[in-house]
Amino acid sequence: MAEGVLFDIAGEIIKKLGSRALQEIEVWWGVKDELQKLECTVSRIRAVLLDAEKKAALNEQVKDWLGKLQEIVYDADDLIDDFATEALQRQVMTGNRMTKENHST
């Protein structure tokens, strides 16, 4: 059951990594390669989750592995959310600055 949730969260991470806000963060902070590696890793994890969910019911080692993986997936999701929040804050600050400059002229 939890593995299905992990599969969905992994899909959301991939979706967030493709967002425009994170693409801007890649440029600002120079982390494009790292975020692309993260996207590739999460894609691989997502593929393995489909098989692991079936095996977890019969194998305690797989169940333990999935528990550890759950922590990593949640941490990655939190990190991506932090990046997205920072990107939105920068967009708002930049937008406000541009609006003020336009009104000053």
Image (cartoon, rainbow, N blue to C red):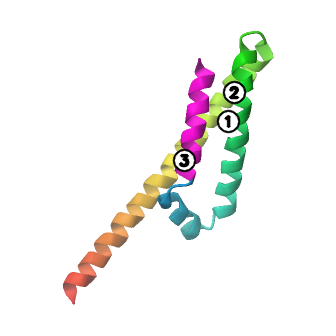
For the stretch drawn in magenta, the main secondary structure is helix
Query: Would residue 4 be counted in the magenta stretch?
Result: yes
According to the picture, the residue beneath numbered tag 2 turns out to be 50
Q: Report the label total.
A: 3
Q: Nearer the viewer, residue 84 or 57?
A: 57
Instruction: Check the image and report above or below for 33 versus 66.
Output: below
Give neighbour class at mark 2: few <14, some 14-19, many 20+ (Cα, 10 Å). Answer: some
**Between disc 1 and disc 3, whose residue precedes?**
3
Per the model, the C-alpha gap separating discs 1 and 3 is: 13 Å
According to the picture, the residue beneath numbered tag 1 turns out to be 46
Query: Would residue 100 be counted in the magenta stretch?
Result: no
Helix, strand or loop under label 1: helix
Label placed on residue 15 = 3
Residue 5 placement (x, y as % from top left): 56, 26
**Between disc 2 and disc 3, whose residue precedes?**
3
Label placed on residue 63 = none
Residue name at image x 24 percent, y 78 percent = 100
Residue 40 placement (x, y as % from top left): 71, 49
Horizontal relation, residue 29 to residue 101: left or right: right
Residue 104 placement (x, y as % from top left): 21, 86
Helix, strand or loop under label 2: helix
Per the model, the C-alpha gap separating discs 2 and 1 is: 7 Å
Helix, strand or loop under label 3: helix
Q: Residue lying furthest bottom in this view?
A: 105
Magenta span of residues: 1-17
Q: Based on the displayed image, in which of its 4 quarters is residue 67 positioned?
A: top right
Instruction: Check the image and report above or below for 41 versus 68.
Output: below
- Check whether the beta carbons of the residues at disc 2 and disc 1 lie within 8 A of each other: yes
Residue name at image x 57 percent, y 52 percent = 17
Q: Nearer the viewer, residue 85 or 23?
A: 23
